[in-house]
């Protein structure tokens, strides 16, 4: 959305299919290192999960030219999201660069709560330091 928010959550997670076989169950990787920086929502940089867990740099709305970097996803697991069970430190397949793997597609899934469902942590207050 691009509100410039840094959201924390101990319940955050990422999914991966490191071998690319979508017929198998996905591997769920939980948030590590406490709740901070679960999701970073900066308008100039696209969605980011952890400081370096997964970053998808979308084209800045102020930019007028594509340079190719807007299609490179970056990922480093460990500090903010747990590593894969095989010890891999990326959501990407073995052999793909953690510093920039070209995206062929991007799918975003969003849950919608029903009118009678309780939304977890919706009474949390943001902390402002002055």
Image (cartoon, rainbow, N blue to C red):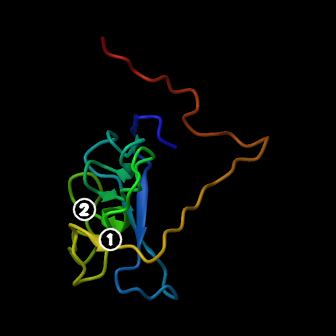
> Residue 18, position in %: x, y?
34, 80
> Residue 118, position in %: x, y?
68, 39
Above or below, 47 relative to 118: below
| Element type where label 1 sits in the image | loop
Quadrant occupied by the C terminus: top left
Q: CA distance from mark 2 to mark 1?
A: 8 Å
Q: Residue at x 41, y 55 (%)?
A: 59
Tell me: 65 left or right of 1. left
> Image quarter for residue 101?
bottom left
> Residue 97, position in %: x, y?
21, 75
Comparing 39 with 4, the one in front is 4
> Image quarter for residue 7?
top left
Tell me: 49 left or right of 99. right
> Residue 69, position in %: x, y?
30, 63
> Which residue in the structure is indicated by mark 2?
77
Q: Residue at x 41, y 62 (%)?
A: 14
| Element type where label 2 sits in the image | loop
Q: Callout 1 environment at 10 Å: few (<14), some (14 to 19), or many (20+)?
A: many
Q: Residue at x 28, y 64 (%)?
A: 74
> Which residue in the structure is indicated by mark 1?
91
Residues tagged 2 and 1 counted as in contact (Cβ below 8 A): yes
Q: Single out the residue that lies furthest toward the right.
A: 115
């Amino acid at each position: 959305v691009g509100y410039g928010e840094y959201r924390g959550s101990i319940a955050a997670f990422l999914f991966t299919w490191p071998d690319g076989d979508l017929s198998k169950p996905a591997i769920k990787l939980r948030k590590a290192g406490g709740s901070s920086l679960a999701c970073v929502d900066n308008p100039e940089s696209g969605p980011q999960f952890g400081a370096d867990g997964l970053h998808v740099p979308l084209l800045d709305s102020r930019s007028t030219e594509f340079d190719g970097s807007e299609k490179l996803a970056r990922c480093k697991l460990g500090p903010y999201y747990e590593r894969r069970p095989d010890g891999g430190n990326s959501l990407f397949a073995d052999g793909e660069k953690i510093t920039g793997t070209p995206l062929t597609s991007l799918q975003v899934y969003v849950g919608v709560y029903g009118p009678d469902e309780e939304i977890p942590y919706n009474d949390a207050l943001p902390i402002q330091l002055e």
